Amino acid sequence: MSEYRIGDGMEVTLHFTVKLEDETVIDSTRDKAPATFQVGDGNLPPGFETPLKGMTDGETGRFTITPEHGFGQHNPQNVQRLPRDQFDDELEVGTMMSFTDPGGGELPGVIAEIDERNVDVDFNHPLAGRTLTFEVEVIEVRPATTH
């Protein structure tokens, strides 16, 4: 057992599974290599890091992550109406597309509604408004090395 516990300045290797309310698995490392990240590096939303603090090698946990601590509430203002003629004909509700934001970055959006003249695109995170279950198995905690 390690003397190290998860906290700032630590590098953590763990297996995780993220599930929806109905237990549908939306992401997991169980069938592949475990994830390694540095606490606070932005790879995990803060709401996913917070319940891990204080855990150590070999510990497991199951946490409920509310929308406020996960991917935020669904915001109706993040749904944009765009002219239908900006899209090709092969368009389906539920399709995820990549758009360019004003700063030139990539912004994923999901086609929410289509009519003859307009397309509504939802730029909320696909998991916005969802309560998630976060299951973890901590494999190793060690001080982060600066490269």
Image (cartoon, rainbow, N blue to C red):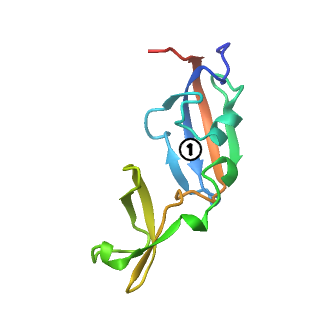
Can residue 66 be seen by looking at this rendering? no
Residue 93 in picture, x, y percent from top left: 42, 74
- Taking the spot 56% from the left edge, 44% from the top edge, the residue there is 17
Count how many numbered circles sit on residues in the image: 1
- Taking the spot 50% from the left edge, 40% from the top edge, the residue there is 30
Q: Quadrant of residue 90?
A: bottom left
Q: Nearer the viewer, residue 11 or 13?
A: 11
Which class describes the residues within 10 Å of circle 1: few (<14), some (14-19), or many (20+)?
some
Q: Nearer the viewer, residue 119 or 136?
A: 119
Q: Nearer the viewer, residue 132 or 106?
A: 106
Q: Which residue is mark 1?
A: 17
- Left or right of 110: which side holds 48? right
- Depicted 125 relative to depicted 114: above or below: above
- Left or right of 8: which side holds 91? left
Q: Quadrant of residue 76?
A: bottom right
Residue 86 in picture, x, y percent from top left: 31, 73
- The amino acid pointed to by label 1 is Thr
Residue furthest toward the bottom?
A: 116
- Taking the spot 68% from the left edge, 42% from the top edge, the residue there is 62
Residue furthest toward the front?
A: 102
Q: Quadrant of residue 42?
A: top right
- Taking the spot 31% from the left edge, 78% from the top edge, the residue there is 85
- Depicted 101 relative to depicted 28: above or below: below
Quadrant location, the N terminus: top right
Can residue 90 be seen by looking at this rendering? yes
Residue 80 in picture, x, y percent from top left: 48, 69
Quadrant location, the C terminus: top left
Label 1: which secondary element: strand
- Depicted 96 relative to depicted 33: above or below: below
- Depicted 66 relative to depicted 42: above or below: below
